[in-house]
Image: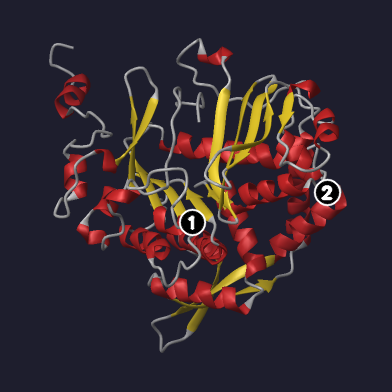
């Protein structure tokens, strides 16, 4: 990716092992040459979140751009500390596998729309172009002979603010739809925000209609030692006042998205149904083992954070997906965070090769107290230079021995990506002298 927020220069996040070389593994086993976990560490404002946001933005464009034809501007997030970048395109690319075949998809865009787009595959170890796009015009496409379908017709229906992949998938182009589904459904993004968390909780309410999901949720909560013995989803009756308030909120939300694909009445009905469904938690009290039932609103932020991350993570593991988490350690104890990460490392739990990408400030995850949650292949660093541009590099760029304390060496500055903090300078700037 290039020219996105604090990312000025081309950068990449690599999930293959440092020992892997070549275009594909000799035996075709991608699981053996890819890492299950990548954790990104760095000081505040180093660019950790921006790297994950670039992934999220690109996936959002792939998912939604077929409906962006009427928009005035294409979403654009250039590096703003260099005047030249505001006049340059941003670039995004995914290198992934589909049915054990390597694919490469990417696009370049600016505020006016899509300036370039490409899709290639490597079925026999050599790059095979399926299509290339060099501009917004219908004539700016080159299609490879292996991309079957009504390519020219679809290109004529693709506007400057639409990705060809998005439009083709919407029109049921077979190959485009396969690639589109792989990217938009295979990679799940979980930001730490109230809106994102509430969205995951709403999804959990639906998933818990399955007994197996509910049992897994109970097991995860018991494991976390949160004092919860049971949970369930129940329907509650909304008072007329609450129903009126939620209806007003839903109408405001709907009106914010004029291009919504659902009818307003259907949206309101779905929204109100979600508000009526409540997750209930059973806690054992100290008075003879009596159970106390609490709503999710009465639970701690740590309980809600654990539930809202652990259940989607288990689903990602069950489906062999990529789970991307910003601020993974927010509201979680370090040992819980380490346990969460270890779910992806455990080969008996993670049988389908699911992967976890996360950003964190918690350096203890590199240490021995975390139970070996992270190894040298799992750690990346984000560092912002004096020019405000972020750089990203893996721990494997440094000599690492088995007996090294990664956390201690990182905090001592051996790998960079730590803030240059001067207590003396801070104190001197805050202490008011007698002469003032």
In this rendering, the answer to whether 353 lies above or below 360 is below
Label 2 or label 1, whichever comes before in sequence order: 1
Give residue 13's position: percent from left, percent from top.
Answer: 43, 39
* Front tag of 2 and 1: 1
Question: Which residue is rendered at x = 64% and y = 68% of the image?
Answer: 207
Question: Which residue is rendered at x = 86% and y = 49% of the image?
Answer: 263
Disc 2 versus disc 1: distance between alpha carbons?
43 Å
The dot on residue 432 is none
Q: Total label count?
A: 2
Question: Which residue is rendered at x = 80% and y = 53% of the image?
Answer: 268
Give residue 139's position: percent from left, percent from top.
Answer: 79, 21
Q: Which residue is mark 2?
A: 262
Q: Is residue 331 visible?
A: no
The dot on residue 28 is 1
For residue 252, which quarter of the picture? top right
**Quadrant that contains the C terminus:** top left
Give residue 295's position: percent from left, percent from top.
Answer: 57, 68
The residue sitting at the bottom extreme is: 288
In this rendering, the answer to whether 23 lies above or below 37 is above
Left or right, 205 with respect to 364, comes to right
Instruction: Say what secondary structure mark 1 lies in.
Output: loop
Q: Mark 2 and mark 1 in contact? Answer it, CB < 8 Å.
A: no
Left or right, 97 with respect to 389, comes to right
Question: Which residue is rendered at x = 74% and y = 51% of the image?
Answer: 245
For residue 45, which quarter of the picture? top left
């Amino acid at each position: 990716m290039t020219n996105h927020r604090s990312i000025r220069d081309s950068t990449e996040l690599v999930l293959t092992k440092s020992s892997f070389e070549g275009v594909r593994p000799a035996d075709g086993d991608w699981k053996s040459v890819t890492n299950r976990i990548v954790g990104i560490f760095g000081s505040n404002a180093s660019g950790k979140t921006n790297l994950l946001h670039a992934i999220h933005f690109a996936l959002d464009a792939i998912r939604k751009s077929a409906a962006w034809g009427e928009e005035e501007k294409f979403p654009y997030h250039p590096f703003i500390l260099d005047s030249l970048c505001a006049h340059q395109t941003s670039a995004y690319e995914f290198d992934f596998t589909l049915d054990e075949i390597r694919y490469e998809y990417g696009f370049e865009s600016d505020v006016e729309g899509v300036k370039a787009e490409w899709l290639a595959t490597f079925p026999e170890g050599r790059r095979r172009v399926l299509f290339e796009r060099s501009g917004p015009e219908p004539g700016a496409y080159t299609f490879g002979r292996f991309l079957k379908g009504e390519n020219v017709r679809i290109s004529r229906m693709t506007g400057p603010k639409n990705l060809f992949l998005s439009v083709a998938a919407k029109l049921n182009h077979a190959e485009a739809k396969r690639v589109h589904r792989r990217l938009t459904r295979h990679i799940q993004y979980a930001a730490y925000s109230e809106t994102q968390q509430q969205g995951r909780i709403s999804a959990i309410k639906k998933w818990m209609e399955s007994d197996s999901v509910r049992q897994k949720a109970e097991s995860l909560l018991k494991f976390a030692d949160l004092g919860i013995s049971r949970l369930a989803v129940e329907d509650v009756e909304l008072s007329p006042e609450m129903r009126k308030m939620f209806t007003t909120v839903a109408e405001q939300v709907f009106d914010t998205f004029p291009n919504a694909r659902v009818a307003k009445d259907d949206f309101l009905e779905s929204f109100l149904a979600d508000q009526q469904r409540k997750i209930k938690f059973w806690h054992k009290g100290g008075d003879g083992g009596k159970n106390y039932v609490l709503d999710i609103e009465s639970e701690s932020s740590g309980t809600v954070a654990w539930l809202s991350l652990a259940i989607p993570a288990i689903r990602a593991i069950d489906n062999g997906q990529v789970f991307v988490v910003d601020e993974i350690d927010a509201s979680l104890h370090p040992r819980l965070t380490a346990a969460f990460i270890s779910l992806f490392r455990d080969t008996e739990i993670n049988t389908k090769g699911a992967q976890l990408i996360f950003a964190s400030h918690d350096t203890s995850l590199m240490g021995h107290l975390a139970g070996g949650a992270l190894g040298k292949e799992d750690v990346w660093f984000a560092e912002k230079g004096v020019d405000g541009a972020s750089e990203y590099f893996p721990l494997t760029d440094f000599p690492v021995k088995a007996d090294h304390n990664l956390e201690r060496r990182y905090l001592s500055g051996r790998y960079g990506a730590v803030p240059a903090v001067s207590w003396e300078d801070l104190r001197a700037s805050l202490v008011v002298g007698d002469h003032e």
